[in-house]
Amino acid sequence: MPDRAQAEPKPFFWIPLKGQPQRTTPPGHERFQGLSGRMELEIEVISDYLYVGSGQLALHPVQGQEQAYYVFSRRNGILIIPGTSLKGAIRAIVEAISNSCVRIVARGELMRSKPHQGCEYKEEGKGLCPACRLFGTTGYRGRVHFTDAMPVGNIGTEIIKIADLWPPRQIQGRKFYQNKTFRKLDLRPAKNHRFLEAVPKGTRFQTTLFFENLQEEELGLLMRALGLDQHPEDPQRVIFAFPVKMGGAKPRCLGGVRFIPKRIRMLQGGLALFPALLTDESSSEVKPLLVQFLARKELLDPEAWARFRREAQPKNEPCPREVY
Ligand SMILES: [Zn+2]
């Protein structure tokens, strides 16, 4: 354990790469087979803050001085979590718990395991790993999409200060951040620090997850990547297994959210899939479907899943404040 010498434990964990992804031919898009529908999800911020950036800076007076800060993502002036951010966060977990190829790599990091290099889709080719079959890759459109998440009720932002981030240099597999407590810094401008516009704990958003032509075991994988699981003693109960991390400043323990399924609408095979999905008609009861999907574990790597579940649990520990 090379970490032991350091005063502050690091806020991330690794899921090691092993063996090779099980690649199979994905279904085509030309006809309906399997399960299609949409799921409405509420997203609740359960870490102290969530910051999803747009890359833009703005100015804000902090203690009498104009201070540049990174703004939260917006569309037409409304705070949103872009669907692409949701997809990226969920895909990273699907990749880890299904031993898929590695697509979601942090900036400046290199993926060295040959068997886990990104799948390439060729018409009659080698097939795709579970994550590429679900989310797509060059030449193959994914079968899972999230809409931009919109605020539920009135939500507000706060300006917070964090120390600059230093990514780990050594890659030991797939890296995920833990859920620990944010340590607030005073708002005085300081070297090697930055300001972010973030939404606080308790803020809620809503999104819709569209899926087409999925197998039950693929939905089982997807539900687990949303942080859901069967109760260990009673498989008929659905529990929140861990918060999903998303957005920026994850190493500062921002970005833990909980996905709460509100409604599911399953669609029987048919031609007018998309128009039908957009109309607001009867939806199925959520829990029995979740139980049904979570019972399917064929695509799950049990070892990676056990490790992920354990490490992603909220830890009642403070997040490192400074460089680590
Ligand atoms: Zn792949």
Image: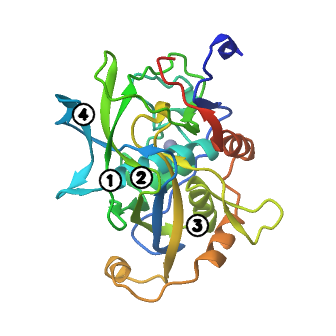
The residue that label 4 is drawn on is 69
- Specify the label residue 210 is tagged with: none
- Give the CA separation, mark 4 to mark 3: 44 Å
The residue that label 1 is drawn on is 82
- Specify the label residue 215 is tagged with: 3
Measured as percent of width and height from the top left, residue 215 is found at 58, 67
SS for dot 3: loop
The three-letter amino acid code for the residue at tag 1 is: Pro
- Residue found at the far right of this picture: 233
Q: Nearer the viewer, residue 183 or 284?
A: 183
- Give the CA separation, mark 4 to mark 1: 20 Å
- Residue found at the far front of this picture: 64
Residue 298 relative to residue 83: left or right: right
Nearer the observer, disc 4 or disc 3? Answer: 4
- Upstream in the sequence, badge 4 or badge 3? 4
Mark 2 Cα-neighbour bin, 10 Å: few <14, some 14–19, many ≥20: many
Q: Are marks 1 and 2 in contact (CB under 8 Å)?
A: yes
- Specify the label residue 86 is tagged with: 2
The three-letter amino acid code for the residue at tag 2 is: Leu
- Upstream in the sequence, badge 4 or badge 1? 4
Nearer the observer, disc 3 or disc 2? Answer: 2
Mark 2 close to ligand 1, CB under 8 Å: no
Residue 20 relative to residue 29: left or right: right
Residue 122 can be seen in this image: no
- Give the CA separation, mark 3 to mark 2: 21 Å
